[in-house]
Image (cartoon, helix red, strand yellow):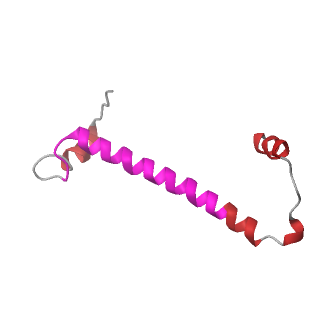
Amino acid sequence: MTVRLSGALAEFVATNVGEDGAYENVSEYIRDLIRCDKERAEREAFDRSKAELNRAFAAPEDSYKPLTAAEVIARNRT
């Protein structure tokens, strides 16, 4: 995989790599950025699921209705 940067982005990466930076090389820096982004995406997905469950548990009992598995699957396809 090849990534090309120029200008301000290349300069910013250079300041984070090498003797004065937090990373030994560009590959290490890019891997860490990807890991952080992956963790952020997973955290956001978890937070969305948690919010949905909180709304469901806060709903009044009489708002629930029984559904078959097929109904749930059909509802989630839309």
**Depicted 43 relative to depicted 11: above or below:** below
The residue sitting at the left extreme is 19
Image x and y of residue 11, in percent: 23, 44
Image x and y of residue 57, in percent: 74, 69
- Left or right, 72 with reference to 48: right
Q: Kindly indicate the quadrant of the structure image that contains residue 1.
A: top left
- Left or right, 27 with reference to 54: left
Residue, x 78% and y 42% (percent of image)?
73
Q: In this view of the protein, which residue sits in the foreground, 26 or 58?
A: 58
Q: Kindly indicate the quadrant of the structure image that contains residue 75.
A: top right
Residue, x 24% and y 42% (percent of image)?
28
Q: Within the magenta stretch, is there residue 69? A: no
Which span is picked out in magenta?
22-51
Residue, x 22% and y 40% (percent of image)?
26
Image x and y of residue 3, in percent: 32, 31
Q: Within the magenta stretch, is there residue 48? A: yes
**Depicted 70 relative to depicted 42: above or below:** above
The residue sitting at the top extreme is 1
Our reading of the magenta stretch's main secondary structure is helix
- Left or right, 27 with reference to 21: right
Q: In this view of the protein, which residue sits in the foreground, 7 or 54?
A: 54
Residue, x 17% and y 52% (percent of image)?
21
